[in-house]
Image: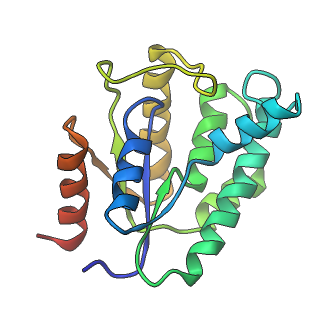
Amino acid sequence: MISPRRIVLTGGPGSGKTTLLEALAAAGHVTSPEAGRAIIRRQQAIDGEALPWKDRALFAELMLDRELEAHARAESADGPVFFDRGVPDVVGYLSLCGLPVPAHMERAAQDIRYDRRVFIAPVWPEIFGQDAERKQDLDEARRTFDAMAETYPRFGYELIELPKAPVSERLDFVLKTLTGA
């Protein structure tokens, strides 16, 4: 149905990306979860420094490492792999934070490739929520969306905005977009 490729879901926090990724997994697709949440959980468990509210640059380095690992794991997949964020998200994150983007991160975002079409989830106040790992407010969610909307095209990707719709409709939208149906 869909040729083997790496498909990214990006956007601001609290916009339904993870819920859509879970629906893709339930439909039998291979998925790769967001690196940031796992890093936050692990760093909180050890009272580590690589947290977005402690050391953003170190947090970004760990995100990059996990994204590179996830991308490499996708090599062995028979079909498409859906990613909750990709390497360019790390560049967008640093830009959002007003931090310099190291040359190795720029290079990684240029060289580590995904499908040219990237799905971007718009800010959706009605479903936005905070939790132990997502401490951003709605304003930062908007700024994150804007940062990703600027970053991905800079690396040659075409953004496709997800509809603000129930997850089943978003799932159909993604699959139909990819198959050209």
Residue at horizontal 25 percent and vertical 54 percent from the top: 171
Residue at horizontal 61 percent and vertical 68 percent from the top: 71
- In the picture, residue 60 is in which quadrant? top right
On the question of residue 50 being in view, the answer is no
Q: Position of residue 131 (x, y in %)?
A: 56, 21
Residue at horizontal 72 percent and vertical 35 percent from the top: 40
Q: Position of residue 44 (x, y in %)?
A: 79, 30
Q: Is residue 74 above or below residue 174?
A: below
- In the picture, residue 112 is in which quadrant? bottom right
Report the number of numbered marks. 0
On the question of residue 63 being in view, the answer is yes
Q: Quadrant of the C terminus?
A: bottom left
Q: Position of residue 179 (x, y in %)?
A: 20, 73
Residue 168 vs residue 103: left or right?
left
Q: Is residue 108 above or below residue 58?
A: below
Q: Position of residue 1 (x, y in %)?
A: 24, 80
- In the picture, residue 120 is in which quadrant? top left
Q: Is residue 34 above or below residue 45?
A: below
Residue 122 vs residue 180: left or right?
right
Give the farthest residue toward the front: 26
User: Could you say which is closer to the camera, residue 119 or residue 47?
Assistant: 47
Q: Is residue 61 above or below residue 172?
A: above
Residue 161 vs residue 120: left or right?
left
User: Could you say which is closer to the camera, residue 129 or residue 163?
Assistant: 129
The structure's colour scheme is: rainbow
User: Could you say which is closer to the camera, residue 61 or residue 51?
Assistant: 51
Residue at horizontal 52 percent and vertical 50 percent from the top: 85
Give the farthest residue toward the left: 181
Residue 29 vs residue 38: left or right?
left
